[in-house]
């Protein structure tokens, strides 16, 4: 459909019955509305529709169809490739739809499609409850859930999609659809890892878990201790109880009170151990890490929602990430991983991470399109820097890390950890065996492929 010029139109003329806020390029607030987490992304939509509810979403979609506008959907704005923005098109911005209602007795939360992880974490914590989320508080609920949902609690409570009870969404033709295990079950299946291909998710319902105690240990070493520490961490996590989570990370030591001045601003090795229980149990578990001569430590019981804020990165940095999911982490892989830390941009916000998986992740429903569920380890080169002159170096480092890990890669990958890496990687994120089934669901709910600003699944023909 050919697009219709927008010049001279005022926001109130763009969509009948729209109760939210519509922004054109010359309007106050437009530049803030098009700012996303990754500063490499600089796109100028024709219209930003900041929706107040499902009716606004339907009205915005109708307007986009009438004008032939390519459409993107924005929640938290954290996708590394900027999937939530589009040049000269329509952005459906859900951030005003961020309410969270917790039924503590039923251990259920109903969450608006534009809520952030911090909104859900804080609301649930007030009742001593939690569910798996991401690893920062500013991630959007919609993107992380629909992509599968990996986070600090996953070894204990499963992936975020494993805790998903229902989704309400608006389809490309403006219909309101509810999906759960009984109503529209095939769509509900597709929403467990198939991404934002099937509609605009306006509300999620999650199951919650009691979490009365939560503990953590963050230990830092000089960078040259990397191989020794990673080997010990690997051995510790190989048969860890499900209460244990966390990561091994090369990072730039932050200017925090607990960090020795000589280490601040230098590359360091860190291990974060999370524990879904009291400190006495946690300390018995991570005791083997304490004899390696660490230079800094934070060992404490902490509210889970507070931990979620510890690694928040503010917008304005340049980002480029990827991941490989591994069948094993032998000594050779440890050596390659640690050697590649020498090519990181440092000092910077870059993190060179290894996550231990297993536990409730591997025990979850293998019918869902989450093909990396059985991997015991994940490597996540998370490039974050400030200077555009470092772009080539940062991308090259990320690619090199993944290439180094290929001998142990299972081929499958978590789509939320990668950007635009081509159609083959998109298939690797949902599983080749799931593709035809997903394409059939896509054909039913979005036959025109309106929702294609994502790791796209083309509708079956």
Image: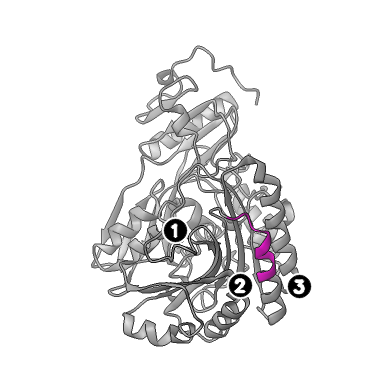
The part of the image, by quadrant, that contains residue 307 is bottom left
| Callout 2–callout 3 Cβ contact below 8 Å | no
Q: In the structure shown, which secondary structural element does the residue marked by tag 3 occupy?
A: helix
**Mark pair 3, 1: CA separation:** 30 Å
Q: CA distance from mark 2 to mark 3?
A: 25 Å
In this rendering, is residue 365 above or below 263? below
Would residue 273 appear left or right of 82 to someone viewing this image?
left
Q: Position of residue 322 (x, y in %)?
A: 64, 57
Q: Nearer the viewer, mark 2 or mark 3?
A: 2
Locate the N terminus and report the quarter of the image it occupies.
top right
Residue 374 shows up from this direction:
no
What is the crowding at mark 1: few (fewer than 14 residues within 10 Å), some, or many (at least 20)? few
- Choose between 203 and 142: the one closer to the eye: 142
Please tell me whether the stretch drawn in magenta is mainly helix, strand or loop.
helix
Q: Position of residue 295 (x, y in %)?
A: 47, 73
> Can you give x and y, in whole percent of width and height, for residue 222 in the image?
55, 70
The residue indicated by pointer 2 is 224
Q: Badge 2, how many Cα within 10 Å: few under 14, some, many 20+? A: few
Determine which of the numbered discs, if any, sits on residue 311 in the image.
1
Q: Which residues are magenta?
A: 337-346
Is 338 in the magenta? Answer: yes
The local crowd at label 3, few if under 14, some if 14 to 19, many if 20 or more residues have their Cα within 10 Å, is few
Please tell me the numbered disc located at residue 407: 3
């Amino acid at each position: 459909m050919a697009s219709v010029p927008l010049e001279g139109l005022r926001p109130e003329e763009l969509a009948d019955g729209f109760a939210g806020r519509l922004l054109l390029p010359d309007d106050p607030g437009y530049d803030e509305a098009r700012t996303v987490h990754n500063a490499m992304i600089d796109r100028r939509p024709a219209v930003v529709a900041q929706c107040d509810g499902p009716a606004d979403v339907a009205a915005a979609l109708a307007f986009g169809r009438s004008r032939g506008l390519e459409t993107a959907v924005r929640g938290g704005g954290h996708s590394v490739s900027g999937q939530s923005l589009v040049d000269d098109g329509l952005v459906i911005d859900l951030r005003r739809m961020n309410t969270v209602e917790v039924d503590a007795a039923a251990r259920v939360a109903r969450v608006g499609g534009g809520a952030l992880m911090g909104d859900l974490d804080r609301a649930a914590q007030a009742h001593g409850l939690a569910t798996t989320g991401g690893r920062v508080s500013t991630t959007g609920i919609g993107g992380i859930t629909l992509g599968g949902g990996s986070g600090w609690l996953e070894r204990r409570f499963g992936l975020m999609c494993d805790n998903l009870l229902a989704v309400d969404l608006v389809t490309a033709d403006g219909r309101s659809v509810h999906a759960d295990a009984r109503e529209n079950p095939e769509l509900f299946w597709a929403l467990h890892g198939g991404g934002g291909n099937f509609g605009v998710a306006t509300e999620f319902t999650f199951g919650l878990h009691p979490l009365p105690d939560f503990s953590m240990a963050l230990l830092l070493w000089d960078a040259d201790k990397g191989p020794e520490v990673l080997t010990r961490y690997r051995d510790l996590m190989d048969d860890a109880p499900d209460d244990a989570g966390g990561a091994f990370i090369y990072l730039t030591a932050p200017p925090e009170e607990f960090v020795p001045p000589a280490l601040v601003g230098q590359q360091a090795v860190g291990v974060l151990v999370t524990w879904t229980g009291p400190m006495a149990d946690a300390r018995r578990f991570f005791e083997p890490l304490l004899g390696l001569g660490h230079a800094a430590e934070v060992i404490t019981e902490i509210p889970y929602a507070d931990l979620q804020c510890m690694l928040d990165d503010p917008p304005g940095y340049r980002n480029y990430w990827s991941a490989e999911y591994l069948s094993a982490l032998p000594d050779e892989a440890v050596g390659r991983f640690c050697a590649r830390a020498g090519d990181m941009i440092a000092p910077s916000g870059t993190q060179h991470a290894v996550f231990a998986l297993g536990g409730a992740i591997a025990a979850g429903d293998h019918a869902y399109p989450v093909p990396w569920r059985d991997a015991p380890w994940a490597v996540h080169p998370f490039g974050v820097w400030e200077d555009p002159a470092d772009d080539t170096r940062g991308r090259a480092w990320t690619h090199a890390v993944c290439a180094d890990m290929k001998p142990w890669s299972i081929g499958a990958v978590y789509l939320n950890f990668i950007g635009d890496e081509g159609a083959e990687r998109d298939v690797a994120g949902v599983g080749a065996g799931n593709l035809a089934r997903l394409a059939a669901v896509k054909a039913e709910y979005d036959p025109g492929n309106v929702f294609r600003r994502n790791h796209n699944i083309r509708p079956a023909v």
